[in-house]
Image (spheres, grey):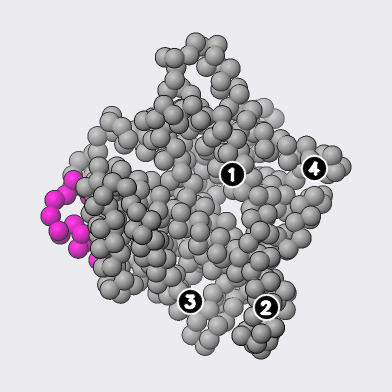
Amino acid sequence: MPRASVEPLAVVEATSHSVRRNTWGEWVQVVAAYTALVLGLTLTFWLSAGPRTETEYCGTYLQLTRWAGFTANCDGFVYMEGARHPARLLEPREVRQSRPLFILLGTAVGYPITWAVQGLQTSGLLSARAVQKLPAKYRPLLGFYIGYVLLNYAVLLAALLLFRHLYYRLTAGRGSPWVLTALQVFLISNQITKAFFWTVHQQMFTFLVPLVLLHVALQLHESDQWRGWLPGLAMLGGLLTLAYGSFVLLLPVLLYGLWLRRQQLTVERTLLGATLLILLFTGPTLLWIGLLKLRGVTYYNHEAEAYGQLVWLQALWQQPFPDFLRLAGRNLLRFLVTLPAIGVFLGMGAGLVWKLGLPVVRKFPQTVIFALLLLQTGFLVVLGYYKERLTFMLVPLLLLLIALLLARVPGRRVEAWTIAFALSWHGWQVLSYGPFS
């Protein structure tokens, strides 16, 4: 990314944060600047080297020009066909039956774009020759492909805006806009966005979910009004799990919000409240399973069936305890093997701690960030399916911890070094080989 694309964004950040409440005009500037940053970084991934063999990726490599292209992930075809024919969600053993809300979002976005594409073709603004260059199975799905890429953009943009909010909140408004921009480069340019931003997938939620967890935890800690909204938040969280499974981590955050009200409630009412929150949170999934039952269909969770996600824990009561411990040890080792994928961020944090000392973990909100990192790590360990892209879920909160450490360093040098490191990181992402899926 050229330096010129960073400077306007930093100016916008500094200007928009000079007042406590941003005007609509300032928000438009921020969104426009972030959109330019996202496009400026992710489009350069098209220049990265393509796969040498077909065994290195799952999907179709779309060769745009002799020197540019990207991979359309193999999972994307299932998402697009599901969005095109959402009634398939009611069929037995439908692969995306556990994520119906994401399919329906694809339907809501995909059909209007499909009609727009058809209108462009009819008017001659989109040549038939351009569409014919696509693989045959993707041609009728072009509108849905574009729709899901726009959803990728929307989710990543939401993560960037929430990261911005949390950054200034954690640094008490004294954070550097240049440091913020540099840290956001790591969210936009990485192995996840390189492989999945321009294709149909759900991996952009990797960045959004941890930030939502932190935002909700902070709001519950500081606002009595938010604690009063716990039942509604539980229902909303339950709906979100029908779009992306990792939103299940909102449940322990909401139970934490209930625990904050312990002095106002008796033990019996606290337990009753916890039961109610769990029922409200699981309600959308139970209603979806019930709807399938009414159709004579048994609910199918592809992730659990194909990859054994979480279901391996059944071994705790299905086999002798020593055997379970050996299985758990093997899974822990498989998780640890994925940590080098986020080694740069762990190294950045460790280096800053060595240089500056540990952050004050007994004070809020650092304690909550550490607690959420432990929660996410525990979730990843017990998942039973271990991929580097899943472990990347820890990065957004690690970046916020790094932000807290950098905020303790005075002077302009930290801004220059952080920006230089971010630009070098992006250059490496573009020049490095893969990943493709």
Q: CA distance from mark 4 to mark 1?
A: 19 Å
Q: Disc 2 and disc 1: Cα gap in Å?
A: 33 Å
Secondary element at tag 2: helix
Label 1, on which residue?
Answer: 240
Q: Residues within 10 Å of mark 3 (few under 14, many from 20)?
A: many
Q: Which residue is mark 4?
A: 292
Task: For marks 3 and 2, give the one nearer the viewer.
Answer: 2
Q: Dot 2 corresponds to which residue?
A: 119
> Is residue 16 at least partly visible in the picture?
yes
Q: Is residue 8 left or right of residue 188?
A: left
Residue 398: give x, y in percent of width and height: 36, 47
Q: Which residue is mark 3?
A: 46
Q: Amino acid at mark 3?
A: Trp
Q: Earlier in the sequence, mark 4 or mark 2?
A: 2
Q: Residue at x 28, y 73 (%)?
A: 4
Q: Secondary structure at mark 1?
A: helix
Q: Which mark is in front, 4 or 3? A: 4
The amino acid on which the numbered mark 2 sits, given as a three-letter code, is: Gly
Q: Secondary structure at mark 4?
A: helix
**Is residue 313 depicted above or below 59 in this figure?**
above
Residue 424 in the image: state x and y as whole percent. 30, 68
Q: Earlier in the sequence, mark 3 or mark 2?
A: 3
Describe residue 373's horizontal placement relative to residue 306 as left or right.
left
- Give, as a single range, the part of the protein colored magenta: 406-420
The three-letter code of the residue at mark 1 reads Leu
Residue drawn at x 84%, y 39% as measured from the top left: 294
Q: Given this view, does label 4 or label 2 mark the residue nearer the observer?
A: 2
